[in-house]
Image: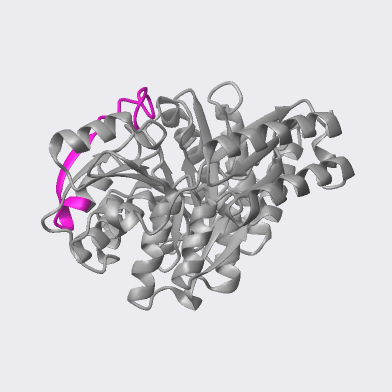
Amino acid sequence: MGRLFGTDGVRGVANADLTAEMTLGLSVAAAHVLAEAGTFEGHRPTAVVGRDPRASGEFLEAAVVAGLASAGVDVLRVGVLPTPAVAYLTGALGADLGVMLSASHNAMPDNGIKFFARGGHKLADELEDRIESVYEEHRTGAPWDRPTGAGVGRVRDYEEGLDRYVAHLVGALPNRLDGLRIVLDEAHGAAAKVSPEAFTRAGAEVVTIGADPDGLNINDGCGSTHLGRLKAAVVEHGAALGIAHDGDADRCLAVDHTGAEVDGDQILAVLALAMRERSALRSDTVVATVMSNLGFKLAMEREGIRLVQTAVGDRYVLEEMKEKDYALGGEQSGHVIVLDHATTGDGTLTGLLLAARVARTGRTLRDLASVMERLPQVLVNVPDVDKSRVKTSAELATAVTEAERELGETGRVLLRPSGTEPLVRVMVEAADIDQARSVASRLADAVKSALG
């Protein structure tokens, strides 16, 4: 698997790449690394452990709990809850560590393990590197220093987790949702109970689809990666809007009353204006990645809101927000971070805030989302090239300059080496889809010629 930790924890096919032995070992390693870092100093450590409904999560959860308890960490097992719920509870309960078992939007056979530090924040890269190093050291034979007797960790179920998290979500809303009929697609995932409960408590009339997880059907033709069923249900039920989550509910996409998709960029635009109106958008700034649609950038400029762009990945958005104390950030994929209420992307919170804006203004989501025009965007993957020379090739630089000159101010070019594969991603935006396709095709040929 190369480096175990990716941008969002360790993922792989459960019981093949991500085994019970690996999961147990990583959990023990995390406990030892955090102890070395002084996180547990002066008190008995506690961890919050949650999972999504995947069948493999059952045995992987058992491995995590066993590993942590064997390392002297008390465990609060919260069961099936969204990733942002585990992050929230880690902070709210004063736990030293949070562990989430999920592969997010991936297909059911996959699973993953993600660690949160005290406060519910993602672990720093250097701590992940240290955990991986310690795990490898002990996997190859070095014995662990193991507590005995009363020193071993104790395990209990924390059944109040769902209610406490839902109360937090509803308490974050600026207004209620009374009078709105909303369709929720839960992807047969971790928010199947949380999200309908939160929207109902907030006053909405809720229709659910994809809310019957059986351990095998997560993300199967539903959720934020498959919006067809949600679009049809919104129109069928005459709903004001629809909200779709992924398997661990850290992202949110939406559908307006006509069945049209509202993506993460449009959601960010709507929330940015809403937060500025109530003086919650600090520095009048929103953070997004370089993959955000140019239409989003142009809309923010027109509305007098500053846009800060980062590398692709919600962890980079979050780092920028925390460093500069910005309140709102996110990705086109629907990872939206509202830092005053969450330490990670929270799909249920995002959906609630979007619905609250519809309820408060009396405007349709279609009308609100029209603040930005999505420019046509074409993405071409160019495989089997030397991606390390993207920034140094003079031939490629000339091709990019010519493309940018042709597109002018209403278009954009982005060449990005893949972080995991031997390929280069060519992204072109233009006012016209045919022009975007033409320019992308020429640039893809240039990448092959210059880097092949």
The spot of residue 250 in percent (x, y) is: 42, 47
Quadrant of the rendered image containing residue 207: top left
Viewer-side residue, 255 vs 53: 255
Residue at screen point 37% across, 22% down: 216
Viewer-side residue, 60 vs 352: 352
Residue at screen point 62% across, 58% down: 310
Q: Is residue 280 visible?
A: yes
Q: Main secondary structure of the magenta part?
A: loop
Viewer-side residue, 166 vs 410: 410
The spot of residue 50 in percent (x, y) is: 41, 44
52 w.r.t. 327: above or below: above
Residue at screen point 27% across, 53% down: 365
Residue at screen point 57% across, 34% down: 11
190 to the left or right of 375: left
252 to the left or right of 72: left
Q: Is residue 160 visible?
A: no
226 w.r.t. 349: above or below: above
The spot of residue 81 in percent (x, y) is: 35, 44
Of the 4 image quadrants, the one containing the N terminus is top right
242 to the left or right of 87: left
Quadrant of the rendered image containing residue 273: bottom left
The range drawn in magenta is 199-222
Of the 4 image quadrants, the one containing the C terminus is top right
Instruction: Verify whether residue 437 appears in magenta.
Output: no
